[in-house]
Amino acid sequence: MDSALLIHRLHFAFTVTYHYLFPQLTMGLAPLIVILKTLALKTNDERYDKAARFWAKIFGINFVIGVVTGIPMEFQFGTNWSHFSRFAGGVIGQTLAMEGCFAFFLESTFLGLFLYGDKRLTRGQHWFAALMVFLGSWLSGYFIVATDAWMQNPVGYERGAGGSLQLTSFWQLVLNPWAMLQYAHNMSGAVVTGAFVMAAVGAFYLLSQKHVEQGRIFVRLGVIAALVFSVLQLFPTGDWAGRMLAQKQPVTLAAMEALWETQPGAPLVILGQPNVAEQKIDNPIVVPKMLSFLTWRSWNADVQGLNHVPKEDWPDNIPLLYYAYHIMVGLGTIFIAVSAIAAFLLWRNQLYSARWMLWILLLLAPFPYIANTAGWMTAEIGRQPWLVYGLLRTVDGYSKLVSAGNAWFSFLGFMGMYTILSMLFLFLVAREIEHGPEPTDGPLLERIQIPVEVR
Amino acid sequence: MATLWFMIVAVMVAMYVLLDGFDIGAGAVHLFIARNDDERCTVLRAIGPVWDGNEVWLLAAGGTLYFAFPLLYASSFSGFYLPLMMVLWLLMLRGIGIEFRTHIGDKLWKGFFDAIFGLSSILLAIFFGAALGNVVRGVPLNADGYFFEPLWTNWRVGEQNGILDWYTVICGVVALVTLVVHGSLYLAIKTEGNLNLRARKVASTFWPVQVLLTIFSLIATVYVVPHVLDNYSKWPIGYLVPAIVIASLAYLYFAHSRKNEKGAFLASCAYIVGMLVGAAFALYPNVLPASTDANYSLTIYNTATGSHGMGVGFVWWTLAMIIAIGYFVFIYRMFRGKVTLEDGGGHGY
């Protein structure tokens, strides 16, 4: 592989993966904050207001990192992937520009009001600001997903002068069926992250006997939302995604499942290591005929295998694709199981004292991030070797005049910068969690500051 | 249609420079004019609620450029690879400098983020000016419409240019001085007391520098790119633009000395718009001239996308701008007037 191409791919993969750690929490927390604000308005219970205020602080820190790591994404289409931009910019530039013009203006305006307008706005207005922040972040998510969906399933274009693509149908681009499906799956995944993070912070407070009352609110809302959206991830959105793949990208599906040969009654691989050289799976544990049923709703249907297409059209990293997909599905299954048990305990009024379950909820917090990342890896590695499916290969998309040395320069720069951002983020969020929501019982306690000795 | 989108992109870039320009300018001077914690807080509060929205104009302009002129976007972004990466890092540093400063009350922590905010603002102003200089001067485009510029070559203006040469460095300095004046005038509007006095003093000090540099840079431009005047001779109405630049500089001085803070700031806005429009007018219909062979120059015609895309783009763009302007009017009215520390009330800065 051309080494410049490799660096450009790693460069984008690194910056976009890192970036998406933040928007998934932003988009996941936003609806939960709206729920808290709504409960506060309805019940007139100030605990909900304080819960919302606490999460708004976490949201604010997270949002800043999301914004500053998001700006490079829009630039990198041009800097590192100029041939792709020239080829497809006339189409996907539309959705990217709409994100800026519609979603970002909306978001930045109301976020300022939401975070800092607490005392200037009435309670109703402040609720409205929270709602608009939620809408802005979800709108921005749609435009980005629609952009990616077009790369997976190009629609509404024609070839113009010089071979580059031009838009022929705005509505086909915006209402791409792939976009709607991917959006549903992606946003539900973001809420899973938000919900499990909220539940984990609540579990932490309950386990350490601090902010107990707020901890209960967090655990309750977190567990219920986690259950609802973990189930939605599997059915219907995950199921739709699998069947869409079987129709539009059968090679991708075959590589995800490491299905080498086209066969009737294809099995579903639960565990095992793909062996590309010998075209088999080592140590397999499979459910017979399940893949045929899941994709075509018939136990004996033919499922297309990798042998159906020439090797140069196979995704170029089948093991990584296979693992990304299996990690996503495996974690998703665990999320459903854990949130179902936790919800059952909640219903029986036992959750708040079930320390073993609180520990599980606490330790589960990083895993939705891994599942969401693995999901995106499945989508993007699965699309290979295409950059725009069926139209432009990845090897033809990068900036030919930006040498490997220059790409390394900025790649290392971003790694350094993001290391600093990570440390700042973890430090500041840990402080907010340590500090906790404002106490609600009795008069407001004066916060005791430990005096710092001046030397 | 391509001409219309050329104007739209130019307007969006101008909006970005006007709006983010004042908070970059405020950042560039705040280390010097805000001398204690209260004053620095005041500066941050003056720009706090709006800087993020201002920066969205950069993203919106970038997105618009992307779909209206895909080749221009692809060529210029990959050609200016190194400086753009540095701009991205500076934008990141500046964002966290503004937003994370107040999370901890410690003096060292605050001082660190103040310095980051100041330095990144100064460097950004210079980079943006140098970028504009590169576009006016021309870049070493090849027959495919691509180029790659090293940061510098021999510092001369020639065929194989670097990002930095004597001409683009001058443009960078002009931008820095312009935004220093612009930001100081904005701070003068938003503050009172010592901070207001010092901000006004910075503007007074830098106004003569700005006038001299403007004249010098215009002469340098005509020397470096002689055909820059072609469009002006073709459509003499263009000479209105330099007239506006001169008039706005004069009015800036007049308003400033009469303590008409808003008038002086608006004059600075008119000056910036005049300089940008003057450059765009001289370039048209080129958008990125080639220093290698005039036939390789990128124009609005050879970089534009298809007419359907431009047509629907115009519909939603108009809608989006009406809404966005609504937001801006609303938020600037909400946070209008002088900033003081007492009225903070839940404000994070």
Image (cartoon, rainbow, N blue to C red):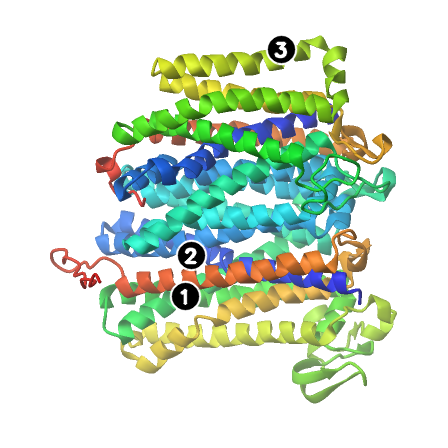
Q: Residue at x 61, y 50 (%)?
A: B85
Quadrant where the N terminus of chain A lies? Answer: bottom right
Q: How many marks?
A: 3
Q: Quadrant of the C terminus of chain A?
A: bottom left
Q: CA distance from mark 3 to mark 1?
A: 59 Å
Q: Is residue A186 left or right of residue A205?
A: right
Badge 1 density bin: few <14, some 14–19, many ≥20, Cα 10 Å: many
Asked whether the beta carbons under mark 1 and mark 2 sit within 8 Å of each other, the answer is yes
Q: Nearer the viewer, residue A383 or A230?
A: A383
Q: Secondary structure at mark 3?
A: helix
Give the chain of mark 1: A
Alpha carbon distance from label 1 to label 2 = 9 Å
Residue topped by disc 2: A29
Dot in front, 3 or 2: 3
**Residue type at mark 2?**
Leu
Q: Which residue is mark 1?
A: A197
